[in-house]
Image: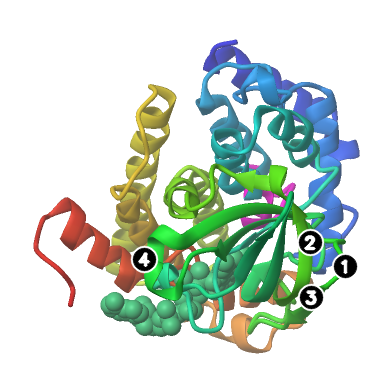
Amino acid sequence: MDLDEYRAGLDAWLEHHAEALAPAHEGKGTLDEQLAQIEKVKRLAFDAGWMRHGWPERVGGLGGSTLLRAYLQEAVTARDLVEPGLFSMQEVLAPTMIDFASPELGAIMVPRLLRGDETWCQGFSEPGTGSNLASLACRAVRDGDTWRVTGQKVWTSLAQYAERCVLLTRTGTVESAHRGITGLFVDMDSPGITVRPIEAVHGSEEFSEVFFDDVVVPAERMLGAEGQGWSVAMDLLPYERSTALWQRAAFLHRRLQQLLELAPADSLDPVRLGEVTQTLYAFRARSRATQHRMADGGTLGPETSIDKVLLATTEQAVFDLFADALAAELTTGDDPASSQWRAEFLYSRAASIYGGSSEIQRNIIARRLLDLGSDR
Ligand SMILES: Cc1cc2nc3c(=O)[nH]c(=O)nc-3n(C[C@H](O)[C@H](O)[C@H](O)COP(=O)(O)OP(=O)(O)OC[C@H]3O[C@@H](n4cnc5c(N)ncnc54)[C@H](O)[C@@H]3O)c2cc1C
């Protein structure tokens, strides 16, 4: 199916099923409500085929261009059907599963994620390891046909809801740095896993600390080979920093439009509005080029750091503009719409941290794209 045909078919389906797809909650909703809504939208869209287009047939997809997936993200966001960051988790985690899990494991697991039957999380960051992933310490020791995992992860989004985790573990010596890391696909109901949710500044327990105490993981759950975990990370992070962001661009576009409708006359400085609009369209143009590069079979790598920096800059600029124009609503409004704007304003501060901080992305751009030398 080509993009025009998909777009027309999906738009008509969304229109026709608007009532069934509509959120049951008002405003942003609680995290429980957001996830229940995402599960519903994914299930209905998967069963009708729309959620399967753009994914390989060997993992339950219907094939076709990855642009179809991008349009689905845009369409559900433009209609306020889902919380965009949480909805796009499959764009972050599924491609790496497809690349690194055994074909049998990928064929069983990926459809569950696409259909919303399961939630997955990403266990990379640790208390002493965020930007410098090569220093991670959560240890896995081989024991016959299994790995035994002991250690801690932190900031693990949706861990308390997740059935599975894409986990990076230390299997070599500490000195082995990026060479001694192995990726595992872990069942979150395994004995020995404790999840402690953390409340973020916007009031939602979106991420958690996760403790592993001698957790047994079958060897066939390895992602790639032993010691190939750095490749897993380098495969996954560019997706997190680019393809998943097309939906974020759609979300920011919608919010800027809503701000223009809401803001009282003369409350927006036209020069700043022009600058923010320009930033948003630069981000969308960059993201569009990335979606097309992937659809044309190109690989994603360090250049996705540009997409990530542009996202963070745009997200904070859009919500800063809102804070200037509608300061009272943002700070004291207690209706669902004001609460949503407030939560999204606060969450926009995280845009320059999650998926790799803006400082680290600028280092990557300087070192790997501009060849400006080491940051040390
Ligand atoms: C909302 C949210 C969701 C997240 N979800 C997940 C998740 O699901 N899974 C997961 O694994 N992680 C997740 N994270 C964690 C995220 O990946 C890390 O927070 C991020 O990579 C930064 O690591 P850190 O917090 O350890 O900060 P640090 O690495 O300690 O950095 C602290 C500060 O120092 C700066 N800094 C560090 N090194 C350098 C350097 N070499 N040059 C210049 N500046 C430097 C950083 O830019 C930052 O400002 C999430 C974070 C957020 C905010």
Question: Percent from the top left, x then y, of residue 121?
Answer: 69, 58
Which mark, by number, is residue 195?
A: 3
Which mark, by number, is residue 313?
A: 4
In this rendering, the label closer to the viewer, 3 or 4: 3
Disc 1 target residue: 191
As drawn, is 369 to the left or to the right of 273? left
Of residues 256 and 70, the one nearer the viewer is 70
Q: Is the residue under label 4 in contact with that under label 3 (CB below 8 Å)? A: no
Q: Is the residue under label 2 in contact with that under label 4 (CB below 8 Å)? A: no
Question: Percent from the top left, x then y, of residue 117?
Answer: 85, 43
Q: Is residue 216 above or below residue 59?
A: below
Say which amino acid is labelled 2.
Answer: Val
State whether label 2 is within 8 Å of ligand 1.
no
Of residues 275 and 99, the one nearer the viewer is 99
Q: CA distance from mark 1 to mark 2?
A: 8 Å
Disc 2 target residue: 216
Label 4, residues with CA under 10 Å away: few <14, some 14-19, many ≥20:
some
Looking at the rendering, the stretch of residues picked out in magenta corresponds to: 78-88
Q: Give the quarter of the image for residue 52.
A: top right
Of residues 55 and 171, the one nearer the viewer is 171
Dot 1 falls on a residue whose secondary structure is loop
Ranked by sequence position, the earlier of labels 4 and 1 is 1
